Amino acid sequence: MHVVVTYESKTGNTEKAAHLVAKGLAKAGATVSTFSINNVDYGALAKADVVIVGTWCGGLFFFGQHPGGAGKIAGELPDLWDKATFAFVSYAHNPGKAADKLGEILEAMGSVNLGVGTIHRDKLKDDAAAFVDDVLAEFASA
């Protein structure tokens, strides 16, 4: 399985989460490439079986949560026609439905979004591992 993990990071937490996700998938046997949204390798993206997109959660503590950097993601990634995707947001307090919204953005770009997740900035390692487990479980059931 060829996987591209791409991310938009504001403070570095999403970047760390993306690398942890990539490491977990590589450990499970996937061939993984990781790119900032600013430096996506479009050739690798075209060859990928799965694209994972991560960003940070913006908004207020209890309302208005949204995937921060979503406009940049939508502007930098090409259309993802029929490409399998997963989405995650890193967050500090309450992610609300930000991950779901990111998944919807990816679907609007033509992808088949297979799942979303959230990764707390204080639990990067554990939450990234749980996200990897969810990604792998989705493919094990297919």
Image: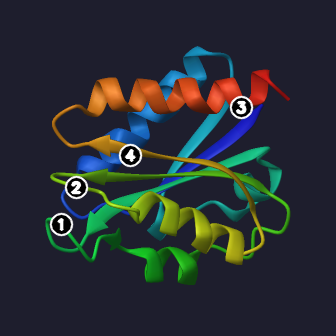
Q: How is the image coloured?
A: rainbow
In this picture, residue 93 sits left or right of residue 40: left
Mark whose residue sits in front, 4 or 1: 1
Q: Relative to 125, say whether 10 is above or below.
A: below
Disc 4 residue type? Thr
Which quadrant, please, contains the N terminus? top right
Image x and y of residue 77, in percent: 62, 73
Q: Nearer the viewer, residue 62 or 23?
A: 62
Determine which residue is flagged by label 2. 94
For image coordinates 69% across by 77% down, the residue present is 108
How many marks the image carries: the answer is 4
Q: Is residue 120 above or below residue 26?
A: below
Look at the numbered discs 4 and 2 and tell me whether their residues touch, using CB distance below 8 Å. no
C-alpha gap between disc 4 and disc 3:
16 Å
Q: CA distance from mark 3 to mark 1?
A: 30 Å
Task: Classify mark 4: helix, strand or loop.
Answer: strand
Q: What's the CA distance linking mark 4 and mark 2?
A: 10 Å
What is the CA distance from the residue labelled 2 to the residue labelled 3? 25 Å
Amino acid residing under circle 1: Phe
Disc 4: which residue: 118
Q: Mark 1 sits on what residue?
A: 62
Q: Residue at x 18, y 58 (%)?
A: 11
Image position, residue 86 (x, y; %): 61, 49
Left or right: 85, with 19 as reference point? right
Nearer-N-terminus badge (3/1): 1
Camera-nearest residue between 24 and 136: 136
Residue at numbered disc 3: 138
Give the crowd class for mark 4: few <14, some 14-19, many >=20 residues within 10 Å: many
Q: Can I make out residue 104 in this image? A: yes
Tell me the crowding category of disc 3: few under 14, some 14 to 19, or many 20 or more residues within 10 angstroms, Cα based. few
| Foreground tag (2 vs 3) | 2
Residue 78: quarter of image? bottom right
